[in-house]
Amino acid sequence: MIPVTKPFLPPQEVYEKYLSGIWKRHWLTNMGPLASELEMKLKVHLGLKHLLYVTNGTIALQMSIKALELKGEIITTPFSFVATTSSIVWEGCNPVFVDIDEKSLNIDPSKIEAAISPKTSAILATHVYGNPCDVEAIDKIAKKHDLKVIYDGAHAFGVTVNGKSIFEYGDLSTCSLHATKLYHSIEGGLVMTKDPTLLKKIAFIRNFGFNGPEAFAELGINGKNSEFHAAMGLANFAYIEAIHQQRRALTEGYDKILGHLKARKPEWHKSASLNYGYYPIIFDDQEQMLRSMAKLQGNEIFPRRYFYPSLATTLPYLESKNIKITDDIASRVLCLPLYFDLSLEEVELIGRLLLRVQNN
Ligand SMILES: Cc1ncc(COP(=O)(O)O)c(C=O)c1O
């Protein structure tokens, strides 16, 4: 069986080394030494001044919206994971969907201004599959209309634009370190900002709003993460480069064998690096995509329709709305298996099966 993704696991003894330290210290959670070490290491690795390690990528988004005190409407993309939209609703704001660019699959900046109303407070955009949004265009619009910007960078670990981390853009950026992500700590998330005051505010929010043992600075929540999760993050840290190289080799393997497939990949931001998080392909039509998916499933290979369906048509707590390019892309996009343990032979098998569907 070949799943769409499979979590990376470090050698067990590497994780156990961290566990024996936890047993010695009896410090299991609440910003322990491993969580702090992970924050330090990630800051250096990503070239960032400020970063907070939190429970998961969803809480990271919710705390970001809370910290910026957003109200009213938030402009966002319908082509993302549900957490992008649900976080907006959870924080009492209304998502306003703007269609995506059909090449990049990210929110289309040229359509944002038409969606701005007197109630708009922010733009929350996703770097889909780790492919950076048009951050310059979004920044310009935000400045012109005095809006805040949050980037959902759940997929974007390690990506740079013009040589600097993608997480430096916007008022705040978030990332997910969930087990299915290319770098993970089982569950986990990151919040990043260049603004030290904002960072401090989120640090309070992450810890119930506590400012010392007997005082409160903010309305807070429990957004902390445990030493056990941080231990996995630290154990995996040493393998970031190996994971990157393997995913790159597999991606190049797909590119080679699928060169003649009648399907395209999203167009990547011209000045950005790649993190090889996903291998999405967009078929010419839904029928071709469904036939391809069925062929793979018949061979115990399980790609994923990701993202499908559009967030604007599926959520029971929102009025359903058709959004042209998003609906179209969501109907015919498929993410192929991509993970550290996948072999080039398996990639070639998947490629051959897809070509067979096309040629039949
Ligand atoms: C785009 C996007 N945003 C947010 C999340 C939520 O992250 P987490 O699962 O860490 O809560 C995910 C998770 O898959 C995601 O893909």
Image (tube, rainbow, N blue to C red):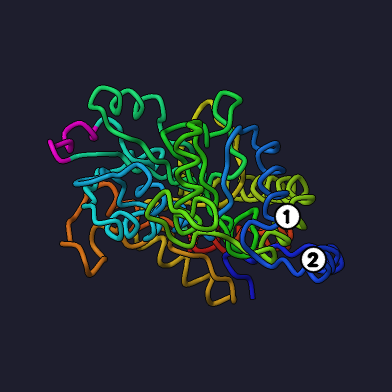
The answer to whether residue 348 shows anywhere in this view is no
User: Which residue lies under the disc numbered 1?
Assistant: 33
Q: Quadrant of the N terminus?
A: bottom right
Q: Residue type at mark 1?
A: Pro
Label 2 neighbourhood size at 10 Å, few (<14), some (14-19), many (20+)? few
The answer to whether residue 192 shows anywhere in this view is yes
Mark positioned earlier in the residue sequence (2 or 1): 2
User: Which residue lies under the disc numbered 2?
Assistant: 25
Instruction: Check the image and report above or below for 343 versus 263.
Output: below
Taking depth in this image into account, of 300 and 272 the one nearest to the observer is 272
What span is colored magenta in the figure?
111-119
Residue 123 x/y as whole percent: 30, 39
Q: Residue type at mark 2?
A: Arg
Residue shown at 28% from the left, 44% from the top = 70
Give how far apart the Cα atoms at labels 2 and 1 are. 10 Å
Q: Tell me the element at label 2.
A: helix
Q: Tell me the element at label 1.
A: helix
Q: Residue furthest left?
A: 118
336 displayed left or right of 89: right
345 displayed left or right of 282: right
